[in-house]
């Protein structure tokens, strides 16, 4: 059986034990990265294809005559044409919950950095301002406590709930977004999306990207938020309209934002948000998931998925 890994470098394999995957009874062809134009040739005769961020289109899938399994080194499935895979009876399996702990701590690192102004105060300690201060401390920036504030969580899956549990430990009021067109029930800790935006001090996104929620956060939604509110996005970049977010930050319509994802990755030169002049914005280069432990779990989970498939079993199958 022939297997192809299209973008192995994207999981940072050098510090991982990958033997559990590579020792499976499959003849592996491993590529560090694969461009769009190389996909067809590389998967043409493959029985198993593993990918992290390389997209598999209808055309790619149609011409892969032997393809039986597409395994994702990721949870999101938006890079795969699921309809095309289903039409050819190809199993598509994603990775689930492997990076929950890693992402949760990153979400809270962003929240704490923005609410404590830790980077600003670190600079104040080293640029001479503390030494020149007439007081024992520097109080140039407003610091906010989390206790008693409202945390609005968009997406009540495992990751959203895990982030919420930390918010509860900080003494926050946790609310989940309710979308009436999707949810037929109400609950005390759910608020309609627009109301959640209006009432939350921190809004954090933990929903998958679909064709229906591109620009879920746009100009209209940002105007609903408190002028002191913080927006966190560690989910998918296209959930947020970047031009609208920059405008809201510049005008002070929201208090700040912490992002680990952008609409294009890597971003093109001149991205409107990659600007040092926005002190109320923190961006990290899609690193929330990359803890050593999370990446090792990812390899082991994908290996388990492929191993089970070879025995005729499907796990984490999305189609």
Image (spheres, grey):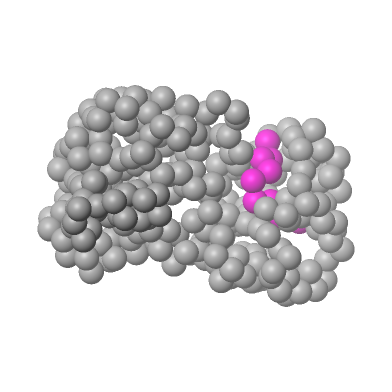
Name above or below for residue 312 compared with residue 254.
Answer: below
With 237 as the anchor, is 58 left or right in this view?
Answer: right
Q: Quadrant of residue 223?
A: top left
- The foreground one among 86 and 213 is 213
With 146 as the anchor, is 99 left or right in this view?
Answer: right
The dominant secondary structure in magenta is loop
Residue sitting at x 16%, y 61%:
147
In percent of width and height, residue 241 lies at 41, 29
In percent of width and height, residue 161 lies at 32, 61
* Tag count: 0
Q: Quadrant of residue 231?
A: top left
Residue sitting at x 25%, y 35%:
254
Name above or below for residue 307 compared with residue 195.
Answer: below
The reply to whether the magenta stretch includes residue 2 is no
Name above or below for residue 247 compared with residue 59.
Answer: above
With 194 as the anchor, is 83 left or right in this view?
Answer: right
Boundaries of the magenta span = 47-57
- The foreground one among 58 and 200 is 200
- The foreground one among 110 and 298 is 110
Residue sitting at x 59%, y 38%:
265
In percent of width and height, residue 238 lies at 46, 35
Q: Quadrant of residue 91?
A: bottom right
Q: Is residue 294 visible?
A: yes
Q: Quadrant of the N terminus?
A: bottom right
With 181 as the anchor, is 23 left or right in this view?
Answer: right
Q: Is residue 196 visible?
A: no
In percent of width and height, residue 274 lies at 49, 34
Residue sitting at x 73%, y 40%:
61
- The foreground one among 66 and 233 is 233
């Amino acid at each position: 059986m022939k297997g192809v890994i299209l973008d192995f470098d994207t999981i940072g394999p050098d510090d991982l034990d990958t033997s559990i995957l590579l020792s499976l009874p499959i003849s592996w062809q491993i590529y560090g990265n694969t461009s769009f134009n190389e996909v067809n040739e590389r998967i043409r005769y493959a029985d198993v294809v593993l990918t992290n961020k390389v997209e598999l289109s209808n055309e790619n899938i149609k011409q892969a005559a032997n393809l039986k399994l597409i395994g994702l080194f990721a949870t999101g499935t938006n890079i795969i044409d699921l309809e095309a895979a289903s039409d050819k009876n190809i199993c598509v399996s994603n990775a689930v919950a492997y990076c929950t702990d890693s992402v949760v701590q990153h979400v809270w690192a962003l929240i704490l950095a923005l609410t404590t102004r830790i980077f600003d105060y670190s600079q104040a300690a080293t640029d001479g301002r503390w030494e020149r201060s007439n007081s024992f401390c520097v109080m140039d920036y407003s610091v906010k406590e989390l206790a008693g504030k409202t945390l609005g969580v968009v997406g009540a899956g495992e990751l959203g709930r895990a982030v919420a549990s930390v918010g509860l430990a900080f003494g926050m009021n946790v609310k989940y977004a309710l979308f009436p067109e999707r949810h037929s029930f109400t609950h005390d800790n759910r608020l309609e999306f627009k109301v959640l935006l209006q009432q939350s001090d921190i809004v954090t996104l933990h929903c998958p990207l679909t064709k229906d929620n591109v620009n879920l956060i746009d100009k209209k939604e940002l105007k609903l938020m408190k002028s002191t509110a913080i927006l966190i996005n560690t989910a998918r970049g296209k959930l947020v309209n970047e031009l609208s977010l920059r405008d809201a930050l510049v005008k002070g319509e929201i208090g700040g934002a912490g992002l680990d994802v952008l609409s294009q990755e890597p971003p093109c030169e001149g991205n409107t948000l990659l600007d040092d002049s926005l002190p109320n914005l923190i961006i990290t280069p899609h690193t929330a998931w990359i803890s050593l432990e999370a990446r090792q779990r990812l390899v082991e989970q994908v290996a388990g998925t492929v191993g089970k498939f070879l025995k005729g079993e499907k796990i984490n199958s999305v189609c």
